[in-house]
Image (cartoon, helix red, strand yellow):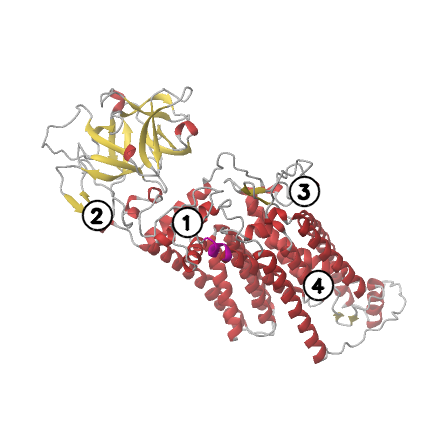
Amino acid sequence: MAATVVRAHKCKNKTKTVDKAQPAQVKENKWHLWLSLCVVFLITFGTRFYKVTEPDHICWDETHFGKMGSWYINRTFFFDVHPPLGKMLIGLSGYLTGYNGTFPFEKPGDKYNETRYQGMRYFCTTLGALIIPMGFDIVHDLTRSQEAALLSAAYLIFDVGLLTLNQYILLDPILLFFMMGSVWGMVKISKHTLAGGSYSLRWWLWLLLTGTMLSCTISVKFVGLFVVLLVGLHTASELWLILGDLRQPIVETFKQIASRALTLILWPILLYIVFFYIHLRVLNRSGNGDGFYSSAFQSRLIGNSLYNASMPRHVAYGALVTIKNHKTGGGYLHSHSHLYPKGSGARQQQVTTYTHKDDNNIWLIKPYNKQALPDKKLQLLRHGDLLRLEHLVTKRNLHSHSEAAPMTKKHLQVTGYGELGVGDANDVWRVLIVGGKANESINAVTSKLKFVHYLQNCALTSSGKQLPKWGFEQQEVSCNLNLRDKYAHWNIEDNRHKLLPNVNFSVYAPGFFARFLESHAVMLQGNAGLKPKDGEVTSRPWQWPINYRGQFFSGSSYRIYLLGNPIIWWSNLVFLALFVVVFLWNAVLQQRREGQAAAAATLSEEQVEDLTQYSESCDCRAGARAGGMKSLPFAAGSPSALSLKAAAWLFVGWLLHYLPFWAMGRVLYFHHYFPALIFNSLLTGIMFSYLIRPLPKWLQHALLGTMLSLVAYSFVLFSPLAYGMSGPLANEPNSTMYPLKWLSTWEF
């Protein structure tokens, strides 16, 4: 029995054949596009370079990254938790603009005076400014809509937070530039591939540029991995569609995979390694970061005590040594004259690990049963020997007892005990070579050692926990009853003994790849262990999208406050929610249409026409044929479909750059949200254009003009946050910023 179909009224608006755009019209559209892009350039560079050299003192993290740029100029080795490219570029920009690398960058607020810091600020600001034209072009390529591109660019231009972040000597503008360049290249590759331009010179250049940008992004900060994931997902999606195109031979899919593997995987990896090679070649002089790295690593640094070191190969009783924890980033066994406070175990001398070299790291190796060996008697230290370690400066012995450690309560406390090297039986330790054999002699640098307490049968270890202020925020040293503790391994670094011949240690210096791998292990460990400094304003991810609290860049009489433009940030959230609703709604509609298409294949031509009219209600943008249905309003290729697809990828970019922070245990700051903000702002322009598309053209232009005016006016209101404030704080009624303190958590 045939299904009954209700016949709908005939559609009066017949589908007409659309004439191809005339050359004059195409030329006019291109002229409008270039005019819009020029306006974007002018406003961007006008807002970014206005007052870029003010204030003329150190602002916020310029104290870190300006200092690191100086170290590159001076070729001084240092430790940082981020990969090297951003700091290398800051140093290079300073060097090329006349900065000599001598300014100390000690603390925020210090005046630059005659220092030529301007070149580094101009460089960072230029990269930050180029984000916006790239964003304009990305949105236009994704949607073919100048309105969407213009509003997205306006959201980036008129955000005072992004402006503030881009005007100083920081890694953030460099990171955001390379991130945006990666997305720009991703979109261009897709555009040329869809246009049939695969394997052309331009296509290859865009692939190489995208691979370069990806490598540069992750070479500035490890969070660059998020854009690598985005480009990887987009590339996989494209390759899947190419595989499903039955008009192309299967060989085409393999060619596309090989091309992208070469340019988007192998080429970025090679560049990444090259950046580290340059980093390690340039920073070849000893600096304050040496102690974070292994003894072997330090032997490659000019000026380090281990560089071309001549010292005894073997370790003997009577030697003055430094003992370094063998874990990645481990410090030196250290003591000082301060005592553990009440409630932290016995009130005896503190023993810690410390990553910097000083005299408090030096220990004297003594026999367990006497103060010293007779003069001119040499006895080598061997696997299984009993010994005592006397702290050279304070003359107290390394000691442990049954008291709990101050931080790790399952471990035993380690202290300095005794007077003038005389203590008790709890000062005795057995030294073991990890994997060693009986009577095997202990060597400096290369022997991995374990110190086991003779009475308590626990292993000397560095727990990795940071002591409070009373311990000068150095690392806790304790004694672990679990002898298999992987952090209980040590090595002798400096080794001095007047009766032993010296040998050159350059033969033990590691090669590039060993140092490359160790650098990563140290960086990752340092990144995971970042803690806030005293008085430092930190935040949590839930606070970022709602612009809950900013942070001071300059807190003197010339105040700079990092805070997003609230009109932009809060409307971003509205359009983000609208995208989710619209996307889900259209997914439901599309599923229903596919069901109708499947049903139409079994009906007569007249029934198909009736079904289509019933479904689409005279929309006339969709129809059916006996074999199936024509393109629907949200089918691939239509402006609506392009907008939703583009918005979907930007939404994925926002998720990838925001959600991972919820799982991070390290200290977090407000500025970590800005990569995600950029994706949200681009999405806002696309969704606004999508929602106003059904309206008359004059109304579309009126709404666009209203939005542009609103964000521009809000920028004028909040621009003092970026360009500098003076006078009373905003919480005082006589302050010019008092009317703009919309949230009590805003501290400007």
Residue at the disc numbered 3: 736
Of discs 3 and 1, which sits in the foreground?
3
Residue at the disc numbered 1: 68
Which residue reaches farthest left?
376
Quick one: 542 or 569, which is closer to the camera?
A: 569
Instruction: Check disc 3 and report its element: helix, strand or loop.
Output: loop
Query: Which percent across, then down, holds residue 172?
Result: 52, 51
Horizontal side, residue 105 vs residue 200: left or right: left
Horizontal side, residue 140 vs residue 602: left or right: left
Instruction: Check disc 1 and report its element: helix, strand or loop.
Output: helix
Amino acid type, label 1: Met
Give the Cα distance between marks 4 and 2.
66 Å
Give the Cα distance between marks 1 and 4.
42 Å
**120 inside magenta stretch:** yes
Tell me which label, 2 or 3, sits earlier in the chain: 2
Residue at the disc numbered 4: 147
Quick one: 585 or 8, which is closer to the camera?
A: 585
